[in-house]
Each structure stands twice: as C-alpha cells, then as structure tokens.
Image (tube, rainbow, N blue to C red):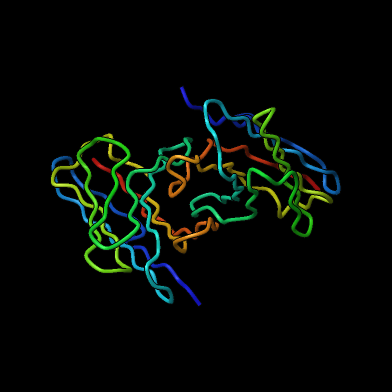
Amino acid sequence: SQKIEQNSEALNIQEGKTATLTCNYTNYSPAYLQWYRQDPGRGPVFLLLIRENEKEKRKERLKVTFDTTLKQSLFHITASQPADSATYLCALANHTGFQKLVFGTGTRLLVSP
Amino acid sequence: SQTIHQWPATLVQPVGSPLSLECTVEGTSNPNLYWYRQAAGRGLQLLFYSVGIGQISSEVPQNLSASRPQDRQFILSSKKLLLSDSGFYLCAWRPSGDPYGYTFGSGTRLTVV
C-alpha cells in the first residue's frame, strides 16, 4: 500500500540548533514533494517545493533534500527559534495524478529557549 | 494579490442535518481547487479536487459531495451528516499548470452531535 511516513513523536530541540525532519514514502513515484508548516487550529502554510530531478532546495534558514533512491526527503531548519515550533507536513504528488497532493501526518517540532 | 475565503469558521450540526461549506478564491482565474479534511491528531485527507468548472474528482467514497458552480467557488455538501463527518475542513487552491504550493483557507471546524 502507499504510505507517507513522518515521525509521529515530537522533536524537541534547543534554540540555535538545526532541526532535521524526515519524510519517507512507499509505493509512490513522486513528480514533486512539498513541505508545509501548520500551527494549531490553522491551515497549512506552504514552505518549499522540490522536484524529482532536484537534490536540494534552500530558502533562508530552510533546506530540503530529496533522494528518490532512498525514497526520502529531509527538511532542515538551521538556527532554530522558538517561533519555529509547529507541525511540519510532508506532501507529494505522483506522476499519475500530479494534480493532487497527498499529505503525511506531520511531525511536531518544539524549539525551547 | 490572491486570497482565499472559507466559511463558516466553526459549525455544530446534529446528526442527519445537511451541510454546506463554501470556499471562494479572489485574484486568479482557473485555479485548481481542493477540499481536505483533518481529523483530530491525523493528517490531511483529500476529499475532492477540481481543475475546472463542473469538473469534480472524488477521492473518498462517503456521504459528502462537492460542486464548482463558478470558476472560483467550491462548495462542499452533505444531505445527512454522520458523527464521523466531524473534523477540520480545509479548502485550498493553486494555479493550474506547473506544480505550485497550495494556499489553504483558514478552515471550518465541524462538530456533528
């Protein structure tokens, strides 16, 4: 069956450290993968998109890697801040059906001062 | 600039009652439109998506339906709500064509009692 797996346990890190979140997928052939941030009671907010032929994307303190051999994406937040505390969602679109995005369950990040 | 409006923000409905949630997008034309549902502590489940007026794709068989009567209007409906319909309903849009990040509305918290 198709799965998008993110660590269900919260990730606790100290301010200033780099947070690394993992997204693994099974039985998908993604055309692209996206990362979103979601705060409690709010809709997700788009952060980054990476295509299947790209290895890495950066945006300010954010970095995403995409390894189609390992079927994995890593999401990094450098110099993390308490304001980065939120749930981060991985989502992908298959080659067949690229019009729709399928989401993982998300990983909660807690950054302590 | 583009904006997305979703209402109502919260809704408490009895079992067996009808449902109508509305979503409109401003500042763009021919958007792809989506309805997602997020159950408590769960990931986002794609319910319906539309790539044009009158074109609706259903992802999950259930007692919900969707319609797109105008280019930038997307409606989620039910004739008779079930307890299991409770959840956080999110409307989203993205430009048609090349992959883009999705922009989500603020969501509707539906409680069926």
Residue A53 shown left or right of residue A78 in the figure: left
Q: Where is residue B36 drawn, in percent x and y?
A: 39, 47
Give the residue displayed 54% in from the left and 42% down from the top. A92
Quarter occupied by residue B86: top left
**Looking at the image, residue A89 lies above or below residue A29:** below
Q: Where is residue B87 drawn, in percent x and y?
A: 36, 43
Give the residue displayed 55% in from the left and 57% down from the top. B101
**Looking at the image, residue A38 lies above or below residue B9:** above
Quarter occupied by residue A97: top left
Q: Where is residue A39 drawn, in percent x and y?
A: 57, 51
Residue B1 shown left or right of residue B71 in the figure: right
Give the residue displayed 29% in from the left and 66% down from the top. B73
**Looking at the image, residue B70 lies above or below residue A36:** below
Residue A31 shown left or right of residue B87 in the figure: right
Task: Give whichever of B103, B29 is nearer the camera.
Answer: B29
How many labels sit on residues? 0
Q: For the C terminus of chain B, give its image quadrant.
A: top left
Q: Where is residue B93 drawn, in percent x and y?
A: 43, 60
Give the residue displayed 25% in from the left and 35% down from the top. B61
Residue A19 shown left or right of residue B77 in the figure: right
Task: Give whichever of B64, A25 is nearer the camera.
Answer: A25
Task: Give whichever of B68, B84 is nearer the camera.
Answer: B68
**Looking at the image, residue B2 lies above or below residue A77:** below
Quarter occupied by residue A12: top right
